[in-house]
Amino acid sequence: MIRATVHFETKNTAVMDRLLKELPKLKRAYITVGIHSDAGKYDDDTEIVDVAIWQEFGTSTVPQRSFIRSALNENTDKINQWREEALVEIVEKGLTTRQALEKLGTKIKILIQNKIKSNIPPEYGTGRKPNDSGTIQQLQEQKRRHGFPVRTLIATGAMLDSVDFKVYE
């Protein structure tokens, strides 16, 4: 879990009143970011969330291509900084808990979408043997010649478009 702490001092009663009003909400508020169960389906009736899980963790036939966990792990410091900024914006700028979490959710959503767009290679190759770079390049060239996109995780764009956040208060 990603955590942030903020320390501040103020004698401004308006700021303290705003903070005291938001504290109960802050204690129980959180966001989820990723592909949720209500993301929808592909044309063949396959749930988008199922495909996301298969890609994120891999299966016996699909190599793992983590785009959520890796985006979060690679940006933990940045996300913690954004959380601290959100708390400061609640106190100093008067944002509500919901507004601050929506800003944070949007930033994390973009991180995950950018990870998807980065053409993530499979962790252990192509899922076929041998998994050397020559074989991978050969398979990509075959796809290119037959008109298939070479980018991983973006066949239709549905999964990319399904990355979203939800705010819970």
Image (spheres, rainbow, N blue to C red):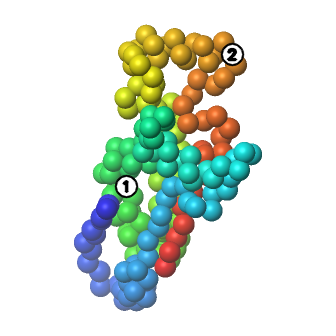
- Residue 146 tag number: 2
Residue 128, position in %: x, y?
A: 45, 22
Q: In the picture shown, does residue 157 fall above or below 17?
A: above
Q: In the picture shown, does residue 58 fall above or below 107?
A: above
Residue 81, position in %: x, y?
A: 34, 57
Mark 2, secondary structure of its residue: loop
How many other residues sit within 10 Å of disc 2, few (<14), some (14-19) or many (≥20)? few
**Residue at numbered disc 1:** 79
Q: In the picture shown, does residue 60 fall above or below 81?
A: above
Q: Residue at x 44, y 34 (%)?
A: 63
- Residue 55 tag number: none
Q: Say which of marks 2 and 1 sits in front.
A: 2
Mark 1, secondary structure of its residue: helix
Depth check: 80 or 9 in front? 80
Residue 93, position in %: x, y?
A: 46, 72
Q: Residue at x 37, y 63 (%)?
A: 83
Residue 150, position in %: x, y?
A: 58, 23
Residue type marked 2: His
In the picture, which quadrant includes the N terminus?
Answer: bottom left
Give the mark, 2 or 1, whose residue is nearer the N terminus: 1
Q: Residue at x 40, y 86 (%)?
A: 24
- Decide if residue 89 is in sight here: no
Residue type marked 1: Ile
Distance from disc 2 to disc 1, alpha carbons, whole Å, reads 40 Å
Depth check: 89 or 164 in front? 164
Across the whole image, how many numbered discs are drawn on residues? 2
Q: Residue at x 48, y 35 (%)?
A: 62
- Decide if residue 97 is in sight here: yes
